Image: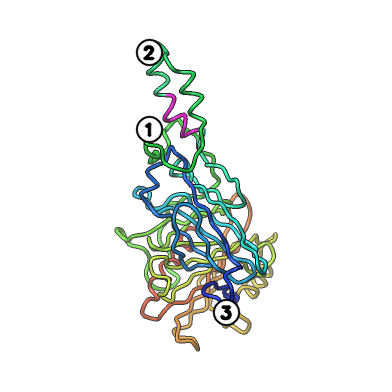
């Protein structure tokens, strides 16, 4: 497993002024005023940071920082997931704006201000069109004024708002997305257990990835980086207990044609630690399992190859956890393996 040094944030050394920071301004649309009842979730480089609607300033050291946000909700349990990488220079307060989506099933928007509320036109249509039709039936009084006011865009709640954020799109609504979904497939077990019916899980579905997979329900993933050609990466931790000592890193990259034994051997060697002695699970999967490493952690690494209509891929998964908690990360590995046959 490629295991780069982890960036960190926190209290600066004694005498240092809080002049280098990331300032995140979180907003929601007046149409989704119910979100004001929930605190937004903010994580920088993995660990969560106390946040609120409005502006939150977090002292950080200079460098590149991964910023993740979502809103804990009812159904679904989280909405508006958004990630970005923020470069921060010495003495700079980097301003970032996050806007929760207007429709619960969409991602949030994050980056330099101003951002847009994703799904706002469709949300307005869901609220306004039925009212317009009702007014038309009643004589059409006030239709023009209603349409003019529907385009208003302010981040604070309005007492006159008439509907909460829709729990899901209507059947006639098309929500563009290139996110994958879980496929129906038999369980495959690299090592340890697989998810069972009734397990609390959350489906990780990254834009542009050809598969989805499950983690425990309290886990979240942020963008990561690995120094491998054409690789995309995510780092996943238990957001409900960031100090649990568990981490999973997952990497995806194309396997060059013809993706035969020579290409697979080369890419697998690049993923595993130098000198690692891997074992074959099948003709497309190799893994390295260590019951306890020099730091007392259970570690597991996997290099797996699969094909889709878009070509051949390598997925690399690496994890560490306290030995007593190894089943938690083993289930994630087995789910990735099952979803990428």
Between 76 and 43, the one lying in front of the other is: 43
**Residue 123 colored in magenta in the image:** yes
Q: Residue at x 56, y 66 (%)?
A: 304
What residue do we see at 65% from left, 72% from top? Answer: 265
Q: Which mark is residue 15?
A: 3
Q: Position of residue 316 (x, y in %)?
A: 56, 68
Q: Residue furthest top?
A: 139
**Residue 82, percent across and down?**
52, 53
Image position, residue 338 (x, y; %) = 46, 61
In-image side of 307 versus 333 (left or right): right
Residue that numbered label 1 is attached to: 160
The nearer-to-camera label among 3 and 2 is: 3
Residue 305 image-quadrant placement: bottom right
Is residue 97 placed above or below 57 in the rendered structure?
above
Residue 137 bears which disc, if any?
Answer: 2
For residue 152, say whether it is visible: yes
Asked whether residue 341 appears in the rendered view, the answer is no
What is the magenta segment's predominant secondary structure? helix
Mark before the other along the chain sequence, 1 or 2: 2
Q: CA distance from mark 1 to mark 3?
A: 49 Å
Q: Earlier in the sequence, mark 1 or mark 3?
A: 3
Magenta range is 122-129
Residue at left offset 46%, top offset 54%: 70
Secondary structure state at the residue bearing disc 3: loop
Is 14 a magenta residue?
Answer: no
């Amino acid at each position: 497993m490629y295991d780069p040094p982890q960036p960190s944030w926190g209290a600066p050394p004694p005498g240092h002024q809080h002049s280098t920071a990331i300032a995140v301004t979180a907003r929601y649309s007046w149409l989704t005023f119910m979100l004001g009842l929930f605190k937004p979730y903010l994580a920088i480089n993995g660990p969560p940071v106390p946040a609120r609607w409005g502006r939150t300033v977090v002292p950080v050291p200079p460098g590149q920082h991964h910023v993740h946000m979502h809103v804990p909700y009812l159904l679904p349990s989280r909405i508006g997931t958004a990630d970005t990488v923020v470069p921060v220079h010495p003495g700079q307060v980097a301003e970032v704006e996050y806007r929760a989506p207007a429709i619960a099933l969409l991602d949030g928007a994050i980056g330099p201000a101003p951002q847009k509320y994703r799904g706002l036109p469709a949300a307005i249509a869901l609220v306004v069109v039925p009212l317009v039709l009702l007014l038309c039936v009643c004589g059409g009084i006030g239709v023009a004024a209603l349409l003019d006011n529907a385009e208003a865009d302010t981040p604070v709640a309005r007492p006159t708002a008439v509907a909460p954020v829709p729990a899901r799109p209507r059947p006639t609504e098309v929500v563009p997305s290139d996110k994958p979904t879980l496929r129906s497939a038999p369980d495959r077990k690299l090592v340890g257990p697989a998810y069972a019916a009734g397990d609390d899980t959350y489906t990780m579905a990254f834009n542009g990835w050809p598969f989805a997979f499950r983690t425990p329900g309290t886990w979240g993933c942020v963008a990561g980086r690995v120094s491998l050609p054409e690789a995309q990466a995510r780092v996943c931790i238990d957001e409900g207990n960031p100090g649990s000592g568990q981490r999973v890193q997952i990497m995806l990259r194309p396997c060059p044609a013809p993706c035969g034994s020579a290409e697979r051997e080369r890419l697998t060697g690049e993923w595993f630690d130098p000198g690692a002695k891997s074992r074959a699970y099948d003709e497309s999967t190799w893994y390295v399992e260590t019951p306890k490493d020099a730091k007392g952690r259970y570690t597991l690494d996997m290099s797996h190859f699969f094909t889709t209509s878009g070509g051949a891929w390598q997925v690399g998964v690496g994890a560490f956890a306290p030995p007593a908690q190894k089943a938690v990360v083993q289930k994630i590995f087995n789910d990735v393996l099952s979803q990428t046959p």
